[in-house]
Amino acid sequence: MRQPFKLIGAALAVLSTGLLAWQFSAQATVSSTVVRPRFVVEPAWPKTLPNNWIVGQVAGVAVDRQDQIWIVQRSRSLTADERGSDPLPGNPRRSDCCDAAPAVMVFNQDGTLLKAWGGPEDPGFLTERCTPAMGCEWPTNEHGIFVDHNDYVYIAGNGGGNNQVLKFTSDGTFVYQIGKAGVTGGSNDTNGDPNGRPLLGQPADTEVDPENNELYIADGYQNKRVLVVDAATGMYRRHWGAYGNVPVDADLGPYDPTEPAAQQFRNPVHCVRVAKDGLVYVCDRVNNRYQVFQKNGVFVQEIFLERDTLGNGSMWDIDLSPDMLQRHLYNADGENQRLWVFQRHTGNVIWNFGQGGRNAGQFHWVHNLAVDSDGNIYTAEVDTGKRAQKFRPDGIGPRR
């Protein structure tokens, strides 16, 4: 089996794409010479849900090729009063509001709900459509969602023992599972699950590269790697750790901003994104950085953001602007409660917006983001945030 465990030295100056040279490492700084894209919140997005539904923690957001917006939300995170008319078994009905919604929900750009399925609140789903006997083990704590170029839907989970990624069709028909609930083989397992696929360790998020139909997994809350499999079969292709190193599962201890950069990812490895030019972006959340790789795992660059951030770290999720060159990189920062806008090819920060709070346009634990073809940004909040928001482009801000 081929594994891209290769470090690069100072001699690496140009990517195989030949498009640009990259600096080896940088601290993100605010640029003083470029214009800044502006965004404003659409406070009425999404529209009021039908069926007296309410959502819990919104653990993932994705945009498909039709510019439909998908979220996965955690009904189990709702409190008893939030689901007062839809109690858990053994608890009495207590109020008129509200009923827990299915886990997967799909909206159009205007915020109208188009369909919903999956999880414990979808009647019959966990007893008929996604059962352990079928090889489908729905996670106890949903985490991340992605919809690929063939309209397949991927869902991960980061609850205790949630060591699986599930693949569905767009209507919720189960296709396959990677990994096995309650079982993990560590960050270097390649084929240990019952179907010969890799075992996982609380994976966080996924993305499919349409060029070769490979599924990238940020693996994740227990393991410390990027894992690549064949999206059609789920079979192993390759994996790597920070800097392209062989991943090591040893506990690195608490993050300390005064120490040299960690040579391994810290948990969680929280996101993975593949750009049109073939670069792969990985969120090393608690280390306050993203790292950039070629598709074969060769390390290219790292960018640090708010390096003195403690707690849950600054680098939660990444998506890219929809222009051909994908000039801008967006980051959801759930510790500092804002969104950051980078020049993708320099790593310079050119703008940030948002602050902690619960008004429209503010955040509490902004967890994921996704961008549609019109440049709208959609965000998802966990903890007690429990919502999705939409931000539309509003021209260009003044030069600094």
Image (cartoon, grey):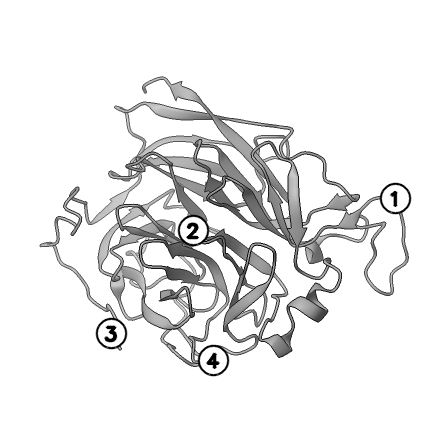
User: Disc 3 and disc 1: Cα gap in Å?
Assistant: 58 Å
Badge 3 amino acid = Arg
| Image marks 3 and 1: residues in contact by CB distance under 8 Å | no
Pointer 1 residue:
96
Does label 3 or label 2 sit earlier along the sequence? 3
Badge 1 amino acid = Asp
Pointer 2 residue:
149
| Image marks 4 and 2: residues in contact by CB distance under 8 Å | no
Q: Residue at x 45, y 54 (%)?
A: 150
Q: Residues within 10 Å of mark 2 (few under 14, many from 20)?
A: some
Badge 2 amino acid = His
User: Disc 4 and disc 2: Cα gap in Å?
Assistant: 25 Å
Q: Residues within 10 Å of mark 1 (few under 14, many from 20)?
A: few
Question: In this rendering, which labeled residue sits more in front, label 2 or label 1?
Answer: 2
In the image, residue 26 above or below residue 300 = above
Nearer to us in this view, 332 or 375: 375
| Disc 4, SS | loop
Pointer 3 residue:
2
Q: Which mark is residue 195?
A: 4
